[in-house]
Amino acid sequence: MRSCLLSGASCHLFCLWALLVGPVWLQNASHHRRKDHGGGDEGVVDKPKLLLLSFDGFRWDYVNRVPTPNFLALKREGVKVEVVENAYITKTFPDHYSLVTGLNAESHGIVANEMFDPALNRSFSMETDSIYDPLWWEQGVPLWLTNQKAGGRSGAAMWPGSDVKIHGEYPTRYLEYNASMPFEDRVRKLIEWFTAPEEQAVDFGVLYWEEPDESGHNLGPESSLMDVVIVDIDEKLGFLRNELKKARLYERLNLIVTSDHGMTQLFPDKIIELDQYVSRDWYTWVDKSPVVALLPKEGRLEEVYSSLLEANPHLNVYKKEDIPEYFHYRHNDRIMPILLEAEEGWTIVQNRSGTFMLGNHGYNNSLPNMHPVFLARGPAFRQNYVKHSMRSVDLYPLMCHILALRPLPNNGSLANVQDLLVVGPSQAPFAGPTGSPSSSSGPPGGVTPGYSYAPTVGSLLGVVMVLGFLMVFVKQVTLKQLPTLPMQSREMSQPLLQEDLHL
């Protein structure tokens, strides 16, 4: 009898404990949903954060020629890709737009730093205000707009195209391009945006720095003077890491460090002069070396082409329709009727009156010297993991996955880079076959499932616990209301009790 009384009392206490613990469990699960993935302060929205940083012209092997402790730290803390094949042509504006759209240049329309659009009858040059005309940019949709359409907020510090009103919208926060603004000030501004009050903070940011591209052009990438420039870039990366740590963002934010292209050494005796082979009166020079776009004057196409076809053994000459398909550089009106491609290390000029650079890029994207660096770390990425290769267009679906966004059709593939992630995609890869924009999969509304299902599972388990303990409590109350049966008839009471509980 005493044991029965103790058992009943224990059961009542146990039920009371369940009623108290259940709501606490639910509250903790709800609290977990409000905390940022990977830790963070109270009340931070559970939305992944991502910062994409480009050091213009940072070749993949620069990190190996001098001590670069901050790049090395990123590799230990995250992932490194040894070979990144960027988009053709390997120039600043096309490649930066490919990184944030996942599109090849022929698809997003920024086919060069200097362009002519016959339909618009306008010219584009990175040296003029034509870069601020939205019509040039609207064949693609950059990730900062996709993020904002899905309810996120984006911040952009000097990224090519980020100070243009593309499709009627700017990034949530952005800086107008100003090459004289120090890297440190750009970093501070981005951190200010990331750490703003919850209703104003950005969750995706892009950051651009002009070096070591400028020094690579002036000094040549093989110059020993470049060592100092590379060390300075590593120190700038260290500044960013320290500022993120001070802002308590370092463990909560996913950081990707890459570039648009590499750089190769030029030689003054490796010059191709077009004036030796074809009259300037027959064509308009549209884009510069090493991939030169020519617009022949009316009726002069065949003359220009035949004059240059076998002019120099270090020069490849293509009619637009004959450009190799694997370049993904044919299907756009802004690609000119004749394309000239110099062999690596060679420079195409009209004559020798112009200035000569010691380093350049823009060459075939299969060349190792054109490949950029790529490292990443953060809660989404594995640690101390090295991958052999990827394509720069694969970065876009990867970033969409990290931000839990549904990507627009693109030329990349999440499947190609999902091994960089701590946890692979929870559904089929968004991107389709390589080489053409793909149809994306995912739920309607533009947002994929959240970063983790753990909070939801925790909430459901909490509800199940409460309901289960309530059933036990009801059972005990029901037993107390039943008439007492003799001990020898205990076996008879069990079916009755089960029948009662099923009612």
Image: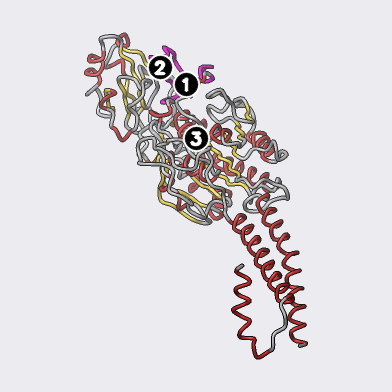
Q: Residues within 10 Å of mark 1 (few under 14, many from 20)?
A: many
Asked if the stretch drawn in magenta spans residue 401, the answer is no
Q: Quadrant of residue 298?
A: top left
Q: Is residue 253 visible?
A: yes
Q: Is residue 370 visible?
A: no
Q: Nearer the viewer, residue 228 or 73?
A: 73
Are the residues tagged 2 and 1 within 8 Å (C-beta)?
Answer: yes
* Region rendered in magenta: 111-132
Q: Quadrant of the C terminus?
A: bottom right
- Residue shown at 73% from the left, 60% from the top: 24
The mark found on residue 144 in the picture is: none
Residue where numbered disc 3 is placed: 100
Secondary-structure class at tag 2: strand
Residue where numbered disc 2 is placed: 117
Question: Where residue 160 sits in the image (x, y, percent)?
Answer: 53, 28
Q: Residues within 10 Å of mark 3 (few under 14, many from 20)?
A: many
Left or right, residue 174 beside residue 388: right
Q: Amino acid at mark 2?
A: Asp
Question: Where residue 404 sits in the image (x, y, percent)?
Answer: 54, 44
Q: Amino acid at mark 3?
A: Val
Secondary-structure class at tag 3: helix
Q: CA distance from mark 2 to mark 3?
A: 22 Å
Which scheme is used to colour this image of the protein? secondary structure
Q: Quadrant of residue 18?
A: bottom right
First in sequence: mark 2 vs mark 3: 3
First in sequence: mark 2 vs mark 1: 2
Secondary-structure class at tag 1: helix
Q: Quadrant of the N terminus?
A: bottom right
**Tag count:** 3
- Residue shown at 58% from the left, 49% from the top: 70
Q: CA distance from mark 1 to mark 3?
A: 15 Å
